[in-house]
Image: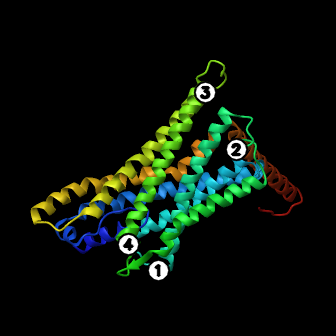
């Protein structure tokens, strides 16, 4: 039963997952199988997401710094999104460890990791909405000043995005704490619900922005006057929308349903509690699975928002070619050094 109580406490952490920690439910529900499922399933997939995200987003930053003008608004969005995804990614190894072993890193680390993770989540949502709106303006009104904005305004927009993200994430820093020496959680149920409904709010607003902007873009591209690359662009837009809703939709539905149980759960007889336990199990399993799809956005963003573009693919090819040429030059120099040392009668190794 101690293992079950550990599970219920750990699942109340900010953004990582949400459940309800009710003493009556703890006594009646056996969640050992769910704990074992999560202990195997979650760390494996989080490890894959972390590796892919680090590789993809660092590569984006390198390409931007090497080949692009960072003062343009478009590139500023892409750079900030890569940084945002890295913040988000930084929290995943800690949550995987916490889920398996409990929180052993102390109260300051609990606050900092929750805060950084929340900043990454909020900034990523804001940036994706702004990038979608910017793409919409670029298609509908390509001569607009917003499309070609550079310099000071790009910096100003970036500052506003991060300031808003820090403001939204501040409760995670202020109101999280370590309880019972092993649980990094929000201090009370009010802030747990705040974390859930904040995610739901970001998802709903993002969905509205996506649907409005992409439907307008599609209508624009379907006009007879638009000719080249129309089919490829329409397919890309369709894929972006499907990935977004499949990734974030189920997860937001699950955490919202769990918030209802958390909010309205009342003491009941053992038969009623048994029924509640059976209701909880599908949600607990669904949380593990849907969370993987949702959190994988940090490694998918570089693919769908950057590398599908012709410009970035060309930059990547150019960078790989330059690396190949450098290796060839180093290899040829090594060969010349070896030949010279052998002809001079000396033993030489690189």
Q: From the viewer's perspective, is 94 left or right of 35? A: right
Q: Is residue 81 visible?
A: yes
The answer to whether residue 144 is above or below residue 180 is above
Between the residue at mark 4 and the residue at mark 2, the CA separation in whole angstroms equals: 40 Å
**Mark 2: few/some/many CA within 10 Å (<14, 14-19, 20+):** some
Can you tell which of label 3 and label 2 is closer to the viewer? Answer: 3
Ranked by sequence position, the earlier of labels 3 and 2 is 3
Could you say which quadrant of the image residue 270 lies in?
Answer: bottom left
Q: Label 1 belongs to which residue?
A: 107
Residue 55 % position (x, y): 60, 54
Query: Distance from label 1 to label 2 (Cα)?
Result: 42 Å
Residue at mark 2: 316
User: Is disc 2 placed on a helix, strand or loop?
Assistant: helix
**Closer to the camera: disc 4 or disc 1?**
1
Kindly report the distance in space between the C-alpha atoms of the residues bearing marks 3 and 1.
Answer: 52 Å
Q: Could you classify mark 4 by the number of other residues whose Cα lies within 10 Å: few (under 14), some (14-19), or many (20 or more)?
A: some
* Residue 218: % across, % down: 56, 29
Q: Are marks 4 and 3 in contact (CB under 8 Å)?
A: no
**Sequence-first disc among 4 and 1:** 4
Q: Quadrant of residue 185?
A: bottom left
- Of the residues tagged 1 and 2, which is closer to the observer? 1
Q: Residue 220's mark?
A: 3
How many tags in the picture? 4
Nearer the N terminus, badge 4 or badge 2? Answer: 4
Question: Does residue 154 appear left or right of residue 136 in this picture?
Answer: right
Q: Is residue 309 visible?
A: no
- Seen from the viewer's position, the closer of residues 225 and 87 is 225
The residue shown at (48%, 44%) is: 207
Which one is in front, 332 or 284?
A: 284
């Amino acid at each position: 039963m101690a293992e079950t109580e550990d599970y219920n406490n750990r699942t109340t952490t900010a953004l990582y997952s949400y459940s309800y920690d009710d003493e009556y439910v703890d006594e009646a529900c056996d969640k050992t199988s769910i704990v074992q499922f999560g202990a195997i399933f979650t760390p494996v997939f989080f490890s894959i997401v972390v590796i892919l995200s680090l590789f993809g987003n660092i590569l984006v930053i390198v390409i931007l710094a090497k080949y692009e003008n960072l003062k343009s608004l478009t590139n500023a969005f892409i750079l900030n999104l890569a940084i945002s995804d890295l913040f988000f990614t930084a929290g995943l190894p800690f949550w995987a460890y916490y889920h398996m072993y409990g929180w052993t890193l102390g109260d300051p680390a609990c606050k900092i990791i929750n805060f950084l993770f929340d900043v990454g989540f909020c900034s990523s949502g804001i940036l994706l909405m702004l990038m979608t709106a910017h793409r919409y303006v670029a298609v509908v009104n390509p001569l607009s000043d917003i499309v070609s904005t550079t310099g000071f305004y790009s910096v100003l927009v970036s500052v506003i995005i991060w300031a808003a993200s820090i403001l939204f994430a501040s409760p995670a820093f202020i109101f999280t704490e370590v309880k019972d020496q092993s649980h990094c959680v929000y201090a009370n149920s009010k802030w747990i619900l705040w974390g859930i409904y904040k995610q739901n709010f970001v998802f709903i607003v993002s969905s509205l922005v996506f649907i409005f902007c992409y439907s307008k873009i599609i209508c624009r591209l379907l006009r007879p006057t638009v000719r080249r690359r129309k089919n490829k662009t329409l397919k890309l837009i369709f894929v972006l929308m499907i990935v977004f809703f499949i990734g974030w939709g189920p997860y937001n539905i699950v955490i919202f349903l769990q918030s209802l149980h958390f909010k309205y759960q009342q003491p009941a007889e053992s038969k009623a509690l048994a029924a509640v336990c059976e209701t909880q199990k599908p949600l607990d399993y669904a949380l593990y699975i849907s969370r993987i799809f949702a959190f994988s956005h940090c490694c998918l963003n570089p693919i769908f928002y950057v590398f599908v573009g012709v410009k970035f693919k060309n930059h990547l090819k150019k960078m790989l070619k330059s690396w190949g040429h450098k290796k060839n030059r180093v290899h040829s120099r090594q060969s010349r050094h070896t030949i010279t040392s052998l002809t001079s009668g000396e033993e030489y190794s690189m």
